[in-house]
Image: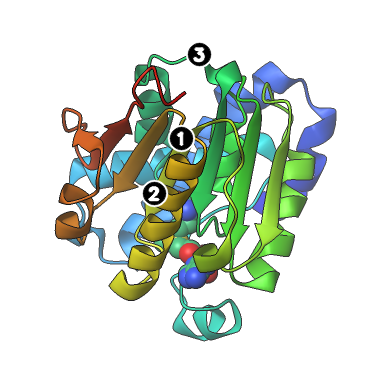
Amino acid sequence: MHLKILLAKHRQLPRELVEWLLAPIISAASTFCIWRKEKAWHYSPTQLYRRFWNISFDLVNGVSTRSITDPLARTSCGPGYEASPVFSFRRLLGHLNIDYAQYAFVDFGSGKGRVLLLAGERPFKQVIGVEFSGEMNDLANRNISLYKRRSAQRVVSLHCDAAIFDLPTEDLVLYFFNPFEAYVLERVLINILASLEQRPRKAIIIYLNLRHPELFDKLLGFWKQENWHPYRIYTYVPDEQSR
Ligand SMILES: C[S@@+](CC[C@H](N)C(=O)[O-])C[C@H]1O[C@@H](n2cnc3c(N)ncnc32)[C@H](O)[C@@H]1O
């Protein structure tokens, strides 16, 4: 309860105070509570550190992006939602070494939109989330409207089935974090290839915790970049003549 009151008021407090003092203290306390409540000896120090970052991300920015672990909440929010880790995803985006302004970023199965907020910190031409659950999509758009650290020209979450989503025409960064079963993924990959054939352009696929490497390894024209554990990165560069 105290925590909620503090958070409700934190918008009036100086940002530095929230960011550097309050949020770390509250996050550490929350991580400790989780550690006790969820029998945290099951977690490694790295997992606890990741949880600390995830909690403080929401606290500092006044958003709600954490994973839904409650099985009852899951049924009302679609097939399930687990958010990508803040710390490693931010580092990964910085590592891409691209001219963001030339690219559109798409998160297939964007949930509450944490990845959209983080990608929106970079000057992408646009950042698009594709989300099957209407409830999640509403939460994501609410988070987008609350998030202040934005450099991308446009950030939006769309209520849409990934299998029928039309890709934007810019160069592409396409992100997946185990959003769906293999048959949907196959459909999405076919659409990606068709779109690149119709309009040749650069594309980067990033997959966190890849479950179906066989589908990606045979993806025409894509080659596997180095592993950025636990992310897999595949790149597609069209020939000069076809561009
Ligand atoms: C594991 S969560 C990933 C959330 C987000 N991408 C992230 O990394 O933080 C997977 C999301 O995919 C969504 N999803 C499942 N099937 C989908 C489909 N066919 N089209 C769009 N979204 C889908 C789920 O509702 C869920 O929110």
Given the image, on which type of amino acid does mark 3 rest?
Answer: Asp
Q: Which residue is found at the position 44% from the left and 16% from the top? A: 98
Q: Which of 131 and 243 is in front in this view?
A: 243
Disc 2 within 8 angstroms of ligand 1 (CB) = no
- Specify few, some or many for label 1: CA neighbours under 10 Å numbering under 14, 14-19, or 20 or more: many
- Specify few, some or many for label 3: CA neighbours under 10 Å numbering under 14, 14-19, or 20 or more: few
- Residue 208 position within the rendered picture, expressed as x and y whole percent measured from the top left: 30, 48
Res 10 seen here: yes
Horizontal side of residue 58 vs 222, given as left or right? right
Task: Report which quarter residue 152 is drawn in.
Answer: top right
Q: Nearer the viewer, residue 151 or 146?
A: 151
Q: Which residue is found at the position 62% from the left and 37% from the top? A: 127
> Mark 3 — residue?
99
User: Foreground mark, 1 or 2?
Assistant: 2
Given the image, on which type of amino acid does mark 2 rest?
Answer: Leu
Callout 1: helix, strand or loop? strand
- Residue 144 position within the rendered picture, expressed as x and y whole percent measured from the top left: 72, 43
User: Foreground mark, 3 or 2?
Assistant: 2
> Mark 2 — residue?
193
Task: Report which quarter residue 11 is drawn in.
Answer: top right
Location of residue 239 with respect to 142 vertically, above or below: above
Given the image, on which type of amino acid does mark 1 rest?
Answer: Val
Disc 3 within 8 angstroms of ligand 1 (CB) = no
Res 28 seen here: no
